[in-house]
Image (cartoon, rainbow, N blue to C red):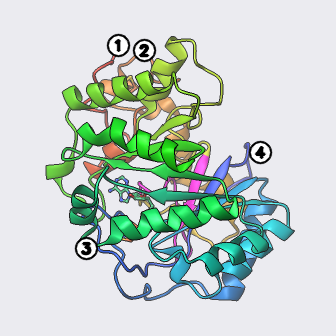
Amino acid sequence: MPAKIALPPPILVTFSITQQCNLKCKHCYSRSSAYPGLNELSTEEALQIISQVKKAGTKLIIFDGGEPTLRSDLLRLIKHAKDIGLIPVLGTNGTTLTRKLVKDLKNAGLKMCAVSLDGANAKTHDSFRCVNGCFDDAIRGIGYLRDEGIPFQVNPCIHKKNYHELSDLLNIARNMGAVGIEAFEFVKTGRGSYEYELDAQIRQQVVDEMLRLTSIDMPVRMIGVPQFDILLKKGGKSDNYHRSGSCCGAGNTIACIFNDGTVFPCMLLSKSAGNVREQSFEEIWNTSDVLNELRDRKNLKGTCGNCLMKDECGGARCRAFANDDILAGDSQCWIVQPE
Ligand SMILES: C[S@@+](CC[C@H](N)C(=O)[O-])C[C@H]1O[C@@H](n2cnc3c(N)ncnc32)[C@H](O)[C@@H]1O
Ligand code: SF4
Ligand code: SF4
């Protein structure tokens, strides 16, 4: 067995507790469908894994999926996380939230909820998520969260066909009382296809718009775009208010546990680092070759390998993996600074 190296624990762990979902989104990285995955963790296993995440030193656990609200033991898992001192957060499409469920989630100890909105209107959102009415259902769900006082943020996935709706989306989020907006850049993984991918020019436009939005009194963050954090820092906004974590967090500050126990460096980067059915989470975090490979920036290749900013940025490893090499350069980077 490889020797244990003492590493800081992940700041947060996402726990994809099921692959079952009531929507059929075109981009879904977990390829979720109407049915649970073939080999999903039992309640007892999931409870043990939550305890392992705590033991590893992590503070924040995000329950997502699939659609996590479709798992019948969700309240028990959240309560356990809270009871052992973790901060439980939920990532949901919002459509299945009822007033009763929201009250139950609050009583179980849920601290925060992220609701996905992939457009500023029903047409854009419903056509991407492939179920008519899901925009209105998500908005209704957000209303219950607001009424019951569970802080929520809005998480849009930004892609080629909706990026122009970003600022309207932000207005919706603010008007509904969101405590933040956290935009995922679309990554070509799972069911996602090239037609949604942003090129360098549009990425720059999107990031400029997001940077402009940081002047408002609400945290604005981006997932899958380490350049956003670099530019924030350059603009003197290096506090944790807007930052999504230091640079590409895959294997460095975050990890993902999938519904069959597989550990991934990030939910958008599905290269296995081990399985919690075979090793403890802490052992995987400390010894996995895949995670160690990501941690050493000297391993980076191409544009990222030759970039002056590789240590502070590192490039989005999920995008590289989408093109088959976890260490490849970001071919659509607009701020690269060759060494
Ligand atoms: C897989 S979903 C699970 C939680 C819940 N079902 C939902 O839709 O919010 C978690 C988040 O990942 C985002 N996501 C899914 N596939 C993605 C992709 N290929 N690129 C970027 N974000 C993606 C979704 O838009 C959502 O905000
Ligand atoms: S992104 Fe979320 S709502 Fe959409 S299919 Fe995947 S798990 Fe379901
Ligand atoms: S080229 Fe440089 S700035 Fe661009 S993603 Fe790679 S490390 Fe970051």
* Residue under pointer 1: 337
Q: Is 263 a magenta residue? A: yes
**Secondary structure found at label 2:** loop
Mark 4 C-beta closer than 8 Å to ligand 3: no
The 10 Å Cα crowd at callout 3, few under 14, some 14 to 19, many 20 or more, is some
Asked if the residue at tag 1 contacts the one at tag 2, i.e. Cβ–Cβ closer than 8 Å, the answer is yes
- Residue type for callout 1: Gln
Q: Is residue 40 visible?
A: yes
| Mark 3 residue type | Asn
Q: Residue at x 35, y 26 (%)?
A: 209
258 vs 184: above or below: below
Q: Locate residue 170: give its quadrant.
A: top left
Which corner quadrant of the figure contains ligand 3? top left
Q: Quadrant of the C terminus?
A: top left
The residue wearing badge 3 is 132
x and y percent of residue 260 in the render?
A: 52, 79
| N-terminal-most mark, 4 or 2 | 4
Distance between the alpha carbons at the discs numbered 3 and 1:
45 Å
1 relative to 264 in the view: left or right: right
Tell which circle, 3 or 1, labels the residue nearer the N-terminal end: 3
Left or right of residue 322: residue 243 = right
Q: Give the spatial CA distance, label 2 vs label 1.
A: 6 Å
